[in-house]
Amino acid sequence: MTMKLKSQIMKLSDNTLTILKNFAEINNSILVKQGNRLRTISVAKNILAEADINEEFPRDFAIYDLNQFLNGLSLHQDPDLDFNEKSFLSIKEGKRQVKYFFADPNVIVSPPEKEIKLPSADICFQLDSPSLEKLIKAARVYQLPDLAAVGENGVIKLVVRDKKNDTSNEYAIVVGETDQEFVFNFKVENIKIIPGSYNVVVSSKLLSQFTNTKYNLNYYIALEPDSTFG
């Protein structure tokens, strides 16, 4: 009985390229593992992202400058990625070919092998695409560094503001109902997520999960230590 060898040649879908471009904002280096799951973690280790994709990578490999790699792919229309060599990737299209050398995995800040789980699920809400877009835009327009999920008067609202400034401009959107009181603080700069709709779960243990079902994508984002619950 002969074993069927996995193909060492593949293409990347638009969805996977979108995910990789987003991951490059979180950490411009990446260690890709064999299989169909992409994972990354920020250098500060306060953002972890993972996505299940349709493609299956035939081997582990590391890329030191992910933006450079993606910009290189954009030189082609529909390239094949050939993983037959251990030390480099061949990017092929027609008469054109690029030899792209892999990085040493030891120089990449990569996520722990262990699966991450929220310690508790204290509040849940849905964040639709227009609301997310408006919050990020308001933070940029008013130059506001902080995002808070606030529970008060029976509702959950997301507020962008400068929490250190009592006279700061604020922009708020109601996203759900609650019988709890809390202030869960984030840094706007840590909300490095693909535009879209999310199911959000927040733990009072200072960790949150943003789930995007369109991309089979999860972000785990740390809360600020001054968050309060109850």
Image: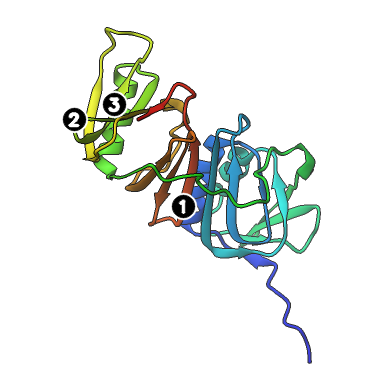
Sequence-first tag of 1 and 2:
2
- Callouts 1 and 3 close, C-beta under 8 Å: no
- Up the image or down, 58 lies above or below 102; here it is below
Where in the figure is residue 175, as x and y percent of width and height?
24, 39
Judging depth in this view, the residue of 70 and 209 nearest the camera is 209
Q: Is residue 178 left or right of residue 230?
A: left
Where in the figure is residue 139, as x and y percent of width and height?
33, 23
Judging depth in this view, the residue of 190 and 182 nearest the camera is 182
Q: Is residue 205 left or right of residue 7?
A: left
Label disc, if present, on residue 153 of the rendered structure: 2
Judging depth in this view, the residue of 155 and 159 nearest the camera is 155
- Callouts 2 and 3 close, C-beta under 8 Å: no
| CA–CA distance in space, label 1 to label 2 | 32 Å
Q: Residue at x 65, y 51 (%)?
A: 114
Where in the figure is residue 97, as x and y percent of width and height?
68, 55
Label disc, if present, on residue 217 of the rendered structure: 1
Q: Is residue 20 left or right of residue 192?
A: right
Where in the figure is residue 207, as x and y percent of width and height?
48, 37
Residue 94, located in which quarter of the rendered image? bottom right
Judging depth in this view, the residue of 160 and 4 nearest the camera is 160
Q: Which residue lies under the disc numbered 3? A: 159
The amino acid sitting under disc 1 is Leu
The residue furthest left is 153
**Residue density around tag 1, few if under 14, some if 14–19, many if 20 or more, within 10 Å:** many
Q: Residue at x 28, y 24 (%)?
A: 138
Residue 105, located in which quarter of the rendered image? top right
The residue furthest bottom is 1
On-image quarter of the C terminus = top left
On-image quarter of the N terminus = bottom right
The amino acid sitting under disc 2 is Asn
